[in-house]
Image: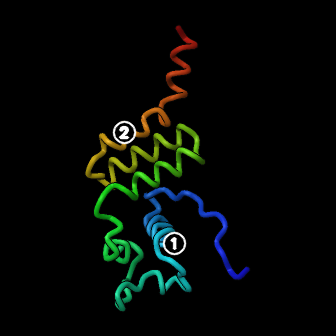
């Protein structure tokens, strides 16, 4: 077995370059270098964000959906809420209500539990 990536951690969108690097690592098959990831159609882009945009990875909310899905598996409920707030305030997903409906239980189970205990 050669050099393979075994586990890739969730990265907050606040860490922009790391977030877009992760997005490229997940979507570009067989990357051989960091420069390779920034090269799209023979053009070397200055940033991972520019490469993601050129690859049309940022045109819909799929990447935010995948980010929240990863967080729902590996993060605390508080961290998922923080991530969702950051997505809303800095990334402006096109269909935030759809993301809310899909992940609201992942973000609020602990609050609902505390309310039930208090009653």
Indicate the position of residue 110 as horizontal and vertical percent values.
55, 27
Q: Which residue is mark 1?
A: 25
User: In terms of image quadrants, where is residue 13?
Assistant: bottom left
Mark 2 vs mark 1, CA separation in Å: 26 Å
Q: Residue at x 48, y 35 (%)?
A: 107
Indicate the position of residue 30 as horizontal and vertical percent values.
54, 81
Residue furthest toward the right? 1
**Residue 100 marker:** 2
Is 89 above or below relative to 110? below
Q: Which numbered disc, 2 or 1, marks the residue that appears first in the sequence?
A: 1
Circle 1: element type: helix
Q: Residues within 10 Å of mark 1 (few under 14, many from 20)?
A: some
Q: Residue at x 34, y 75 (%)?
A: 55
Q: Residue at x 37, y 72 (%)?
A: 52
Is 66 above or below relative to 80? below
Q: Residues within 10 Å of mark 2 (few under 14, many from 20)?
A: some
């Amino acid at each position: 077995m050669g050099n393979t990536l075994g586990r890739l951690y969730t990265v907050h969108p606040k860490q922009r370059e790391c977030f877009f690097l992760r997005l490229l690592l997940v979507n570009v098959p067989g990357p051989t270098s960091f420069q390779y990831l920034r090269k799209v159609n023979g053009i070397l882009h200055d940033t991972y964000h520019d490469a993601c945009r050129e690859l049309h990875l940022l045109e819909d909310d799929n990447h935010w959906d995948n980010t929240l899905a990863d967080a729902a598996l590996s993060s605390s409920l508080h961290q998922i809420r923080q991530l969702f707030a950051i997505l809303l305030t800095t990334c402006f997903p096109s269909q935030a209500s759809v993301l809310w409906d899909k992940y609201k239980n992942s973000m609020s189970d602990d609050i609902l539990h505390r309310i039930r205990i208090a009653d």
